[in-house]
Image (cartoon, helix red, strand yellow):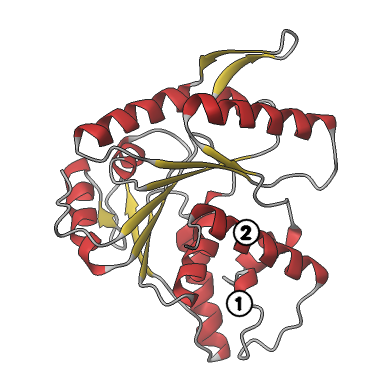
Amino acid sequence: MIDDIAKKAHIIVVSNEKGGTGKSTISMHLAVKLLKEGFSVATIDMDGRQGTLSKYIENRQNFCKKNKISLPMPIHYRFSPQESYDLIPADRSNVRLQIQKLIPSYDAIIIDTPGNKNYLFEEAHKFADTLITPISDSLIDLNALAEIDFDEQKIGKPGHYANYIWDVKKYLASQGHAYLNWIVVGNKISALQSKNKHLVFEYLEKLSKLYGFRFSTGLKDRVIYKEMFLEGLTVLDMRDEALKRRMSVSHVAAKREIKALAEFICPEE
């Protein structure tokens, strides 16, 4: 059980029981956004084998070193199911202990989870204050949340991921945390106005009322997110004087999306 007296960090878990939904892109942009606002931030890559977030941060470190500049950088930790010389040994009990040790040291901890359910995935959710679930505008992706009969326009049983989050909510409640700020975020959304996309958004709004999450249309599928990964940059860095970069129309639009998402996750009072 987490000691509430010692607790400082707000823990954001970015999760979907599916790979390729853009969890690492959201994790990195949120980390930089919070750092730029003056908060101390740690990031944890629970997907140690694939290590997309770790690679993102490594690219950022290399870019800064090569160009002799300084950009906001989270303190990063990486866990893997297999022990390795450069990874934190990640048996279940050690994962829990390591996260507990980090909680008093930061304002925010952002945890990027694996795309499949394993014990690292499970341990991350036990610490969640905010849960962010990226989802694409695909009817197939909706199956993780609910069984839907589109012909009859009926919502059936909860999907495997929604069932798991229900278990997470019950666990958190048993530990004295009655509320989980669960947010489902549209990510890699097509710019085209398709019937398919509108149908996905329509059902996500309906499911939000049934399952108790908030839904944000989120981020479009922009090439610049992939391009900036190679240098470890985010759209929030583009105004940095050290970069000397011009912002394109796409950069400006993406920056607005990120700011809107951050405001949706943590509304300013």
Q: Is residue 20 visible?
A: no
As drawn, is 122 to the left or to the right of 137? Answer: left
Task: Select label 1 or label 2 by which is in front.
Answer: 2
Residue nearest the observer in this picture, 80 or 9 = 9
As drawn, is 23 to the left or to the right of 113? Answer: right
- Quadrant of the drawing holding the N terminus: top left
Q: Mark 1: which amino acid?
A: Asp
Residue nearest the observer in this picture, 197 or 77 = 197
Whether pointer 1 and pointer 2 mark residues with C-beta atoms closer than 8 Å, the reply is no
Instruction: Tell how many labels.
Output: 2
- Cα distance between the residues tagged 1 and 2: 16 Å
Q: Mark 2: which amino acid?
A: Ala
Query: Circle 2 — which element?
Result: helix
Q: Position of residue 227 (x, y in %)?
A: 69, 65
Question: Which residue is rendered at x = 64% and y = 46% of the image?
Answer: 187
Residue named by callout 1: 237
Question: Which residue is rendered at x = 46% and y = 69% of the image?
Answer: 34
Residue named by callout 2: 260
Against 158, is 142 above or below?
A: below
Q: Is residue 106 visible?
A: yes
Q: Position of residue 83 (x, y in %)?
A: 27, 51
As drawn, is 25 to the left or to the right of 180? Answer: right
Question: Which residue is rendered at x = 33% and y = 32% of the image?
Answer: 169
